[in-house]
Image (tube, helix red, strand yellow):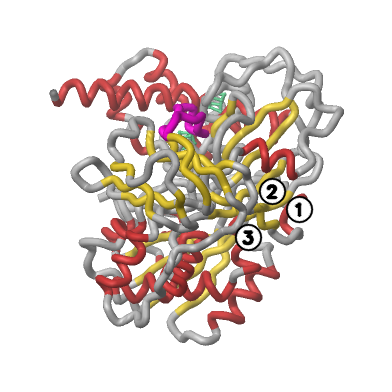
C-alpha cells in the first residue's frame, strides 16, 4: 500500500490582517431568513406551513435516512413562516428554502441541555437533533461521522484555516476557546478517544496561547502547530502531521476522526444549551470591501445584507467578483443574491479584471491567479493569457496529492477516461495549487475538475 507522506506545500499570502484582529459582530436581525433545504426540496419533510409561528431553534424540516443523509433543519429566528420557495444558493443551484419573517424577538424553544456526558447515544442524539453538520465546508452530518466507527483513539480539531483572507475559525478559537475545547471533550467522549489534538497554523501566537492555556485543564489534549503553507488544512495533511498516520479514504481507517473547530463549538453549544445550530461565523473580506469583518449570522441570512453591513463595495471598484469560500477553492458567484448556508465560511469580494470573466461557479484556479498571484503586480491592466505548457514540472512538484496535473489535464481535454482513471483523477482535492504555480497561467485544475466529472459520469454509466 502506498502511504501518504506530508509534502511541503506552497506559501501563499495570508491576507488575513484585515479581519483577524476585529471582534466578531453578531448579526441577528435580517428581516427574512431563508432556511436552505436542498436542491430537490422533496427529500425533506416540511413540518410548517405559511402563517405558522415558529420559535428560534424550532424543528421545521427533516430528511430521514430513507431519503438521503439524515438532517434536521431549524428556524434561525422566531417569527412567521411566509413561504416555501426557491432561492439562489452559493453552489449555483437554486435551493428550496423555508422563508421566515423575523419578529426580532428571538423567542427560543424550550431547550434542554444534556445533563451528563455518560451516555454516548444521548450525545449523538442531541447532535443529530441539533442539525449539526461539518462547518469547515463539507457539510457532512456530524452525528454520522461518529456512528458505527470503532477503535478511534484520537479526535483532531482542524483549525488550520489555510485559505487566504478567511479568519472565521481564527476568531472562534480566540473568542470561544473554552467552548471549542469543550466540544472536543464531548466528541472524544462519544468514541472513547484517549487523545485530543487541535491543529493550527504557525504564526498565530494569540490563538496558540489561548488554546494552550485552556488545554492545561486536560492531560490528554494538546495543541500542535503546522507550517504556514497551503494546503495545511487538507484532512490527510492534518492527520499525518498530528499523528503521523495515513489512510486511504477516511480518517477513521487509521483510528482518527477530524472535525473543524467551528463544528466543535456548535457541538458544545448544542449539548450545553440544548439549542440547535442556527448560526455560523462568516468572514466578509477582500480588497473591494469597505470594512472587512467577521459576522456571527443566522443561517439563511441574505448575503447582500452582510456585504451592506461591511460598508458595501468601495467606490473605486466599478466591477467586482464575489467568491464564496476561499480564493483557492471557493466558488465564484454571479452576484450577491444568495443566502448564507451552514457551509459558507466567507464572502470575498475582489476587483474584477476586464477582458477576463470568471465562468459562473467554476473552481477558482482562475480567481486565485488573478487575485493572489498576478493581481499583486498590476491588477487593472493585466490580461490573462494562457500560454503553452513549457513542461517545467512545477505543477507535478507541488501537487500535494502527488498527482501529475499536466498529464491529467491532457487526459481531461482528450476525454480519455481510461487514462484519467490510471492517473487517479478522483484523488484530486481541487486545491488549485497546480494552477497557482503554473508559469504559463494555465487553468490546470479547472480542466482536471471537468475531467473528474467526466470520469465519474462515465463510470456511473458503466455500472448501470
Ligand atoms: S488541484 Fe488537484 S491536481 Fe492540482 S495540485 Fe491540487 S490536488 Fe493536485
Ligand atoms: S506548471 Fe504549467 S507549464 Fe509547468 S508543467 Fe505544469 S502545466 Fe505545464
The residue that label 2 is drawn on is 14
Q: Using the rendered view, name the quadrant where residue 12 is placed.
A: top right
| Visible residue check, residue 328 | yes
**What residue is drawn where x is 57% and y is 80%?**
214
Which residue is disc 1 drawn over? 17
Crowding at dot 1, Cα within 10 Å, few <14 / some 14-19 / many 20+, comes out as few
Locate residue 444 relative to residue 70 in the image: left or right: right
Task: Provide the secondary structure element on which disc 2 rests.
Answer: loop
Dot 1 and dot 3 residues touching (CB under 8 Å)? no
The CA distance from mark 3 to mark 2 is 13 Å
Q: What SS does tag 3 mark?
A: helix
Which mark is nearer the camera, 2 or 1? Answer: 1
Q: Which of 192 and 319 is in front in this view?
A: 319
Q: Residues in magenta?
A: 84-96
Mark 2 CB lies closer than 8 A to ligand 1: no
Residue identified by numbered label 3: 170
| Rendered position, 86 above or below 118 | above
Q: Which residue is drawn at 61% across and 81% down?
A: 213
Q: State if disc 2 and disc 3 touch (CB < 8 Å).
A: no
Nearer the observer, 155 or 131: 131
Counting from the top left corner in percent of width and height, residue 224 is at: 54, 69
Location of residue 87 with respect to 210 vertically, above or below: above
List x then y, in percent, for residue 404.
Answer: 43, 31
Image mark for residue 58: none
Residue 414 shown in magenta: no
Tell me if residue 368 can be seen: no
Q: Based on the picture, tell me whether residue 94 belongs to the magenta stretch.
A: yes
Amino acid at each position: 500500500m502506498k502511504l501518504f507522506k506530508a509534502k511541503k506545500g506552497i506559501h501563499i499570502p495570508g491576507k488575513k490582517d484585515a479581519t483577524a484582529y476585529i471582534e466578531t459582530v453578531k448579526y441577528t436581525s435580517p428581516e427574512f431568513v431563508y432556511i436552505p433545504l436542498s436542491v430537490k426540496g422533496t427529500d425533506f419533510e416540511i413540518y410548517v406551513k405559511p402563517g405558522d409561528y415558529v420559535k428560534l431553534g424550532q424543528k421545521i424540516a427533516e430528511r430521514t435516512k430513507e431519503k438521503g443523509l439524515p438532517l434536521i433543519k431549524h428556524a434561525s429566528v422566531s417569527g412567521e413562516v411566509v413561504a416555501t420557495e426557491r432561492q439562489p444558493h452559493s453552489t449555483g443551484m437554486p435551493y428550496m428554502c423555508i422563508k421566515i419573517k423575523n419578529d426580532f424577538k428571538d423567542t427560543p424553544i424550550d431547550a434542554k441541555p444534556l445533563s451528563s456526558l455518560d451516555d454516548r447515544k444521548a450525545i449523538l442524539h442531541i447532535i443529530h437533533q441539533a442539525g449539526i453538520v461539518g462547518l469547515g465546508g463539507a457539510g457532512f452530518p456530524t452525528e454520522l461521522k461518529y456512528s458505527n466507527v470503532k477503535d478511534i483513539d484520537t479526535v483532531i480539531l482542524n483549525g488550520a484555516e489555510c485559505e487566504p483572507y478567511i479568519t472565521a475559525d481564527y476568531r472562534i478559537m480566540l473568542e470561544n476557546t473554552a467552548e471549542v475545547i469543550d466540544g472536543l471533550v464531548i466528541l472524544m467522549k462519544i468514541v472513547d478517544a484517549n487523545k485530543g489534538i487541535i491543529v493550527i497554523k504557525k504564526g498565530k501566537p494569540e490563538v496558540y496561547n489561548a488554546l494552550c492555556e485552556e488545554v492545561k485543564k486536560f492531560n490528554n489534549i494538546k495543541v500542535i502547530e503546522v507550517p504556514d503553507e497551503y494546503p495545511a488544512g487538507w484532512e490527510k495533511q492534518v492527520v499525518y502531521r498530528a499523528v503521523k498516520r495515513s489512510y486511504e479514504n477516511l480518517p477513521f481507517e487509521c483510528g482518527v476522526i477530524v472535525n473543524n473547530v467551528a463544528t466543535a463549538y456548535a457541538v458544545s453549544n448544542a449539548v450545553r444549551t440544548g439549542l440547535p445550530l442556527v448560526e455560523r461565523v462568516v468572514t466578509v473580506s477582500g480588497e473591494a470591501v469597505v470594512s472587512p469583518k467577521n459576522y456571527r449570522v443566522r443561517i439563511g441570512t441574505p448575503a447582500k445584507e452582510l456585504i451592506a453591513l461591511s460598508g458595501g463595495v468601495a467606490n473605486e471598484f466599478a466591477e467586482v467578483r464575489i467568491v464564496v469560500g476561499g480564493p483557492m477553492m471557493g466558488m465564484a458567484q454571479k452576484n450577491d443574491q444568495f443566502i448564507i448556508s451552514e457551509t459558507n465560511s466567507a464572502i470575498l469580494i475582489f476587483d474584477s479584471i476586464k477582458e477576463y470573466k470568471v465562468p459562473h461557479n467554476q473552481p477558482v484556479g482562475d480567481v486565485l491567479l488573478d487575485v493572489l498571484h498576478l493581481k499583486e503586480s498590476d491588477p487593472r491592466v493585466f490580461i490573462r493569457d494562457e500560454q503553452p505548457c513549457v513542461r517545467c514540472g512545477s505543477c507535478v512538484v507541488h501537487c500535494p496529492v502527488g498527482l501529475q496535473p499536466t498529464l491529467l489535464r491532457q487526459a481531461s481535454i482528450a476525454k480519455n477516461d481510461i487514462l484519467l482513471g490510471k492517473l487517479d483523477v478522483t484523488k484530486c482535492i481541487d486545491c488549485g495549487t497546480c494552477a497557482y504555480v503554473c508559469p504559463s497561467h494555465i487553468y490546470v485544475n479547472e480542466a482536471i475538475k471537468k475531467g473528474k466529472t467526466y470520469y465519474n459520469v462515465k463510470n456511473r454509466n458503466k455500472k448501470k
